Amino acid sequence: MVLHIAKRELYDHLNSLRFAFTVVLFLALMIANAIGHFGEYNIRLTEYRKKVATSLDTMKGHTDSLFSLMLNGPGQLYKKPSALTFCADGGERFLPEYVEARNYGWMRSWQAPGEKPVTIQNIWHLTYPQSNPNLWDITPDYTNISWVAIISLVLPFIAILFTFDAIAGEREQGTLRLTLSNSVPRDLVLVGKFLGAFLSIGIPFVIAVLINLFLLYTAGGVPLGANEWGRLGLILLVALIYLSIFIALGLLVSSRAKRSSVSLTILLLIWVVWVVLTPSTLGSLVSGLQPTKTIEELDSYRWQQRKNLNAQYPLGKGDGPTRAIPATEMTLLWAEYVKKEAQLKEQLHQEHLTDQISQINRARTITRISPASIVQYTIESLAGTGFSHHLSFLEAVHRYAPEFRQFLLDTDGADPKSPHAPYVPEGASESPVRFSEIPKFEDSNRVSTDLNAALMDILLLVLFFVVSFALAYLSFLRVDVL
Amino acid sequence: MVWLIAKKEIYDNWQSHKIILTFALCIILLMMSVWLGLIDYSERLLGYNLTRNANTFASVGKPALTYVFFDEAGKLNPNSTTRAASIVNLIGIYRRPVGLSILARGLEDRMNRPVRLFDVLGGYTATIDTSNSQEKNKLFVLFSPPDFLFVVKVVLSLLTILFTFSAIAGEREQGTLQLMLSNSVSRGQMLLGKFLGGYLSIVIPFLVAVLIALFLLARDPLITFGGENWLRILLLLITSLAYIALFFFIGLYISALTQRAATAAVLLLAIWVILTLVVPNVGWLVAKQVVRVPSQQQIDTEKFKTAREIEDDAERSKPSGMFVPGYGKFHPEVQPQIEEARQEIEERYAKLRQKRLRLSQIVTRFSPTGAYVHAATGLAQTSIEDEEFYHSQLVQHKTQLDATIKETFALLQKPEKQPLIYQNLPQEPRALRDRLVKINSYEGGTVRNIIQNELSFTFDLLSLPRTLNAIWLDLSLLVLWLGFSFVFAMLAIMKCRVRQ
């Protein structure tokens, strides 16, 4: 019986104008998406590899002595591009694509009479670029046609088009009474209508998606392995759950509204407010209410911290050994200071980063009252792009930095000739380091972590669906037939 | 007669839920957009003021910055340390944020970032550097708030559709169209009446909301609008009203053509999606495919390669003892040449970016939304033309700074004022060190005076006549669209069927 109603609905839809519009729109957007991303992945991957190679080359240049490596660090650590950028690239263009693990800063040198000159330099630490330089090459009033935009904006719009008159329209024409005068339970009618709309939107959508993937795979240079197919399958599942939410919502409003024009008005209002405006407006509201430190506060805070550190060491204005402190002790003091200084700088940078990230996370949490945001975040996690990938990239960097430091200390410890006072030229091992033994950074896109990040969001979407469907069900059970 | 129909329409609309929705939506959205825009504007203003203060600080605090060079063995080269001194180590210039950008953001972000002008190694030419600035949490760009432009462009055009889709098709379905036309009402009068009635019921809530929003804007102490700015706002408002009217006629046209109101709704929403979402985006997509601009990182690589080539050429003719880690052999005498090459590359790609924007502008003009966006950003001083004007001024400032650097350097070349690095000469006698400090602070005074007196780094904005000159095409396209949609609506109503 359900199938019968669903079939009738489906045939109705297939012959309608809106179905033709849906097919054309989905195809146009998906093909535009494919063409827009032709060859993009290969370019980004080549660029990424080139940069990593350059960074490694620089590191190789520092292997002549362990101290040189301690001074200069591993270089720039790059974020690996995802093959699925065409699914979600909104934030990808704006986020920084590397972390600096290099040496910036000061050096001091002196020469005591009768001795060889001594030079002290600061050592490497992690710094985080504030933004991608391409950030400024953005164009206003432009939504990037990625899957995220198609799914989060267009899919609910189409769902509204298909459902606004599903019940109100039938009531207006009097066919609702006819249908229900047969021996059909009301819940079956609702389920049938739901399935009909779901299939008539879902099928063209899936076909458009397959065409998009076919184009990208054959001509666009996007490699699709088992890993990618798994991710794409999940993204498709998320899209279909999201679609179901809005079909149920459409049926709910359509059964409550007296006339189909009223139901269309309400639904479009919901679409504009909940889908289009809520994500961006709420996000910027949160940023306005809880600003991070201004640059002035930040600067004075950093200045104070460094002053505190400097006060702890009797190193003066970068002078050489004095009578009070003999040369060897001075060197040890410098070694300690240099280490502490790098630690402090890194800590200050990380504090700022954590501030910024928690600000974004707050915005993301609050915007989750709109399923459009949830879908965006989920697809970004699943595609391994955007902010969630950026977070996992930073995590990987923070795992790697201590590993690299430990390696330096271990190597220094293993050299019997070293005085074991690293971070000053005289204190570290002077023997060359074997390049192959140095731990190297590699960013990875792991399905398990990405899925973990997306899981709560998927559950939240399911919850949205269950609630909206239950409401639609209840409201249809007591709907007026006339 | 026209007025009678309009009155009937207005009464009809004003008793329906639609009007409440329109009121609520217009007021909430416009107030929200202005409020968020003001928060954002005050932040940008703060950044602007900070950078301006930082200017004097940078030039006073560090008049002479020393570069230290290494020889190839990685050892300090004692001869090179005293050579190069930098006069202007960092000047952040920043265009004051434009108040009207609260209404239409446009390209404001591109023109509103701190630009650093500093002299390159060796201290002969200034360079424009826009790479790093820290004034705000950049990651927040992912949440860009809606502005007035967006509300009109998307939300009001959608509301217009809701007001019109059943205007004729719905009356036909209910049979009232036949009744109305059986009176002595011409079809033209009916169209005008319907238009006036519906248009007023949408425009009055809109104007009320705009007035509230403008009141919010005007009473904010940060906003000091002169007469020209209010004139711009008025023009923006008129353009917006024309844009809404245009969608109104499209709605009436489709409603007259279709048999059922539901069909009209679907058709109109399809048209709306195409005009407001698809065409503008496709315009950009096409432009991106036709004019390829490499990423900033690729451009930086190209600049580095060019610099290296020049250095290597110089190395072949005259080997240098200076070696900069991460860069290679360094030749002070070719630095101006390198800087010129770098700026040339940067300019070339800036032009390419402009070309890409222009192309996307041409394609998006196929939709009235595109024309409206260009006209509105033009009026808000955030359009493509404004950015071009800004960029040309930036280049001018660089040239000006170049000249100043040369002048100051000549001043400092006098033997007794040769800048030296006291920090790296600890074994010098105390008296000499004190003298060096004195010289340095004296030079700091010179530099500060020059910067304050001669380098103002102000930016002009496009005047209203120039703006109008830039957007006349968009305005006339909007009028053309308006005329076309009116004529089509008229024709459709003239020959539409009265009965179901």
Image (spheres, rainbow, N blue to C red):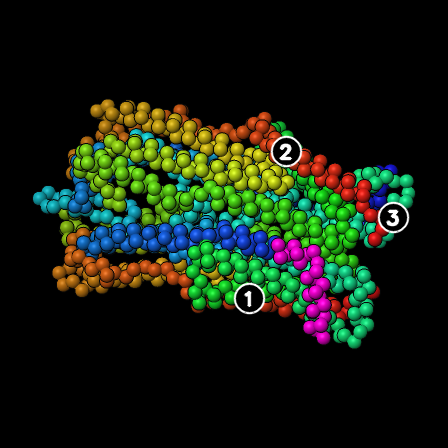
Outermost residue on the left side: it is A114
Q: Which label sits on residue A332?
A: none
Viewer-nearest residue: A238 or B156: A238
Q: CA distance from mark 3 to mark 1?
A: 50 Å
Residue at screen point 83% across, 38% down = B189
Residue at screen point 74% across, 54% down = B263
Residue A249: x percent and y percent? 67, 63
Neighbourhood count class around disc 3 (C-alpha, 10 Å): few under 14, some 14–19, many 20 upward: some
Observer able to see residue B3: no
Outermost residue on the right side: it is B183
Viewer-nearest residue: A261 or B360: B360
Badge 3 is on which residue? B178
Q: Which label sits on residue A237?
A: 1
Q: CA distance from mark 1 to mark 2?
A: 45 Å
Residue A44: x percent and y percent? 40, 52
Q: Kindly identify the amino acid type of the residue bearing the numbered disc 2.
A: Leu
Instruction: Work out whether disc 1 and disc 2 sit on a shared chain.
Output: no
Q: Determine whether B398 is above or below A33 in the image.
A: above
- Residue A4 on the magenta span: yes
Observer able to see residue A164: yes
- Residue A333 on the magenta span: no
Badge 3 or badge 2: first in the primary sequence? 3
Residue A117 shown left or right of residue A228 in the figure: left
Badge 2 is on which residue? B475
Residue B166 shown left or right of residue A288 in the figure: right
Determine the image quadrant of residue B326: top left
Quick one: SS at disc 2?
helix
Determine the image quadrant of residue A421: bottom left
Question: Range of the magenta residues?
Answer: A1-24
